[in-house]
Amino acid sequence: MDSLYSRCEAPKRGLLLEHFQELSVTMLKAATTAMAVRSPETELSIVELAGGCLAFSGADVPLTRAIGIGTSGLVDEDCIETVERFYKSRNSPVRIAISERTDSSLPEILNARGYESDAFMQNWWLPLDGKAALTGSEDIEIVSADLNQADEWARTVAAGFEEEDSPVDEARIPQRALDTFYCLGFADGAQPFFAKYKGAIVGGGVLHVTGETAFIRTTSCRIEHRNKGVQRALLAFRLHAAVTAGCRFAFSSTDKPGPSSRNLRRFGFNTLSTSFTMCS
């Protein structure tokens, strides 16, 4: 394995952060484009700006956000006003992702304009070169989901994300939430998977491959089947698939300490950075 992937230190860490941003922008563009298939009546837009992109796929859709803005240098008030016009003309809140590559001028301007911080994320990375195959439970099977199963996959994964203390009724999940999960699972480059426990569908997740990088994301398990190794099996399967696809390293993100971050650590993932969203 070459020196770039041996340790996460500057400037090697800077290259990883750059790859992470490139993959994040690629996934956002792909998911936004997928919304045009899922919801043709929505007027979609993707605009390149200030080192990143502005994406709109519906005012009430979490995918509607700006990523990478301010990563190519200083940001001024004119740039922020361009971003705000883009979203406000579409009657949408302004959501701007802030990463460790973002120039400090951007959060300073946003703070002065009354923006608030939200959606903090911990980002992870793992070198894959030479990574051995990892096994899961014999009771758990991971299988691909195809387009004919898109609604079932979206409902299963959305329900798993919604469930905290008790089961949720899949029939009551809002349509826009289902649209969002469809786009996350069936965008270009995304590979959606079901997790089955003793033959029953109990969860799902996504592997997103772009070139030599993989993103392990959009993973959930129904509450009644947690603590059975479902998340670990999904992680092991997707890492093996990423290695098979020729990926050299994988990324993932978690929103808070918990089972997901613990599983990533067990599989050798290293912390890379933190990021968050500033909202108007």
Image: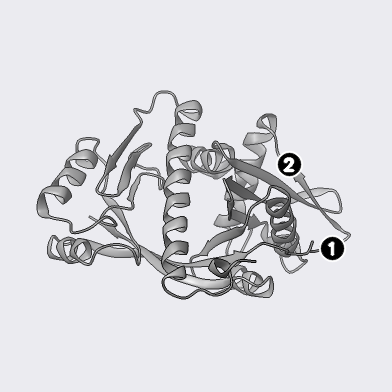
Q: Please, what secondary structure does the residue beneath circle 1 have?
A: loop
Q: Please, what secondary structure does the residue beneath circle 2 have?
A: strand
Q: Nearer the viewer, residue 199 or 16?
A: 16
Q: Report whether residue 52 is seen.
A: yes
- Quarter of image, res 188: top right
85 lies above or below 212 = above
55 lies above or below 249 = above
Residues at marks 2 and 1, CA–CA distance in whole angstroms: 17 Å
* Residue 215 x, y percent position in the rendering: 57, 54
Q: In screen coordinates, is 141 left or right of 158?
A: right
User: What residue does disc 2 label?
Assistant: 144
Kindly identify the amino acid type of the residue bearing the numbered disc 2.
Answer: Ser
How many residues crowd mark 2 within 10 Å: few (<14), some (14–19), many (20+)? few
- The furthest residue to the front: 2
Q: In screen coordinates, is 9 left or right of 211?
A: left
Q: Nearer the viewer, residue 34 or 131?
A: 131
User: What residue does disc 1 label?
Assistant: 137
